Each structure stands twice: as structure tokens, then as C-alpha cells.
Amino acid sequence: MNARPHPLPPVTLVLGGVRSGKSLYAEGLVEAHAGEGGKGLYLATAEAGDKEMAARIEEHKKRRGDAWETIEEPLDIRGVLADHARPETPVLVDCLTLWLSNVMAAGRDVDGEIGDLVETLGGIPGPVVLVSNEVGTGIVPDNALARSYMDHAGRMNQAVAAKAQRVVMMTAGLAQTLKDEK
């Protein structure tokens, strides 16, 4: 059994803007919890819809290396969490805002999906770290779809943060703990 010098709470939310360091920080949390020789499960929600996104996905894969098992699932993150989360296998979901855009593009009930995810987080048998973009600090978009996305993302982040025991905000590679229930 691996020593776990940095125990994770059941649910950790890592928020931040684009290129804020949130994924790298979240990966570090999971790797520290898994310990030497342990593996984390990387639940990737992104789909490579164009060359630029494919390059981003490839960059993340190279950075992770062999210390991770990766499951790519754009929609059914609840199912993957239910099937794969274990006390000895921390799960990293990267990222919730891409998942949200996938849910919206699929025409699913966004509020229902978010509610189901939050409910699922209460019963996961192992630690989960969720990465999400903070999209509400910029300019209000000029079109209804973008405003709807921003509103859903804000409500989703609030709901997940309320369920999480730890919430961290990343800015310029620096972590600020917003919530830490011990």
C-alpha cells in the first residue's frame, strides 16, 4: 500500500481561467495522493473538433505520461465515476466546462445533467478532482448561446463548489484555497 502524504478530500474543485495552471495543479494533487507507483484515472471530456484542439489534447497526454490511466468520455462522466472511482484510485475530471459544452451541443437537459452530476459526487467511493473554467469574470457575450453557456457554467461551478470539500482558484499558476473543510 502506498503512503499518501497528501490526502484528498472526497471532492476537490479546481477553478481558473484559460492557461491559469489549473490542470497541472489538479494533476499534482492526484499524483501526490496516489503516491509513488500509484496511478490516477484521467477522465478527459474534450473532443478534438479541430487541429488546435487536437494539439491541446496531445499536449496534456504527453505531460501526463504513464502515471495515468485515461478514459475519454465527453458526456457520461457520471457513469465513468460510478464504474471506476475507488479509494486507491483518485480520479481527475478535466474539464467540467468542456463537458458542459458537450451536454449543450447534444441538446440534453443541462440543469438536469448538472443536478445528476452533483448528486453523483455525494456517493463516489474515492477522491475526485474536478477542473473547471471560471468564465464569469470577463465581458458578457453579445449572443444568447454564449450568455446561456456562461450562465450554466456559473451555476454548475456554484453547485459543484457547494458539494466539494475543497475549492481552489488558480490565477497565473498560483493556487488560492477558497474552501477547505477538514
Image (cartoon, rainbow, N blue to C red):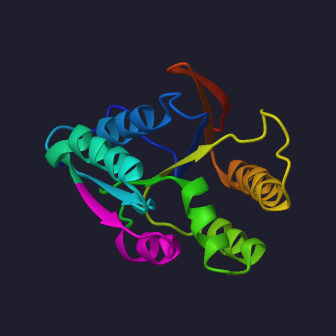
Q: Nearer the viewer, residue 170 or 91?
A: 170
At x 69%, y 68%, the residue is: 114
Horizontal arrangement in the rendering, residue 126 relative to residue 3 (left or right): right
State whether residue 155 is above or below residue 117. above
Q: Quadrant of residue 72?
A: bottom left
Instruction: Classify 100 as above or below 13.
Output: below
Residue sitting at x 29%, y 41%: 59
Residue at coordinates 41% horizontally, 57% vertically from top-left? 50
Q: Which residues are magenta?
A: 69-84
Q: Is residue 2 visible?
A: no
Would you say residue 1 sits in the magenta stretch? no
Say if the magenta span includes residue 78.
Answer: yes
Residue 86 placement (x, y as % from top left): 35, 64
**Quadrant of residue 156 within the rendered picture:** bottom right
Whole-percent x, y for residue 58 in the image: 27, 48
Q: Does residue 64 appear in the picture of this structure? A: yes
- Foreground pick, 65 / 159: 65
43 vs 151, left or right, is left
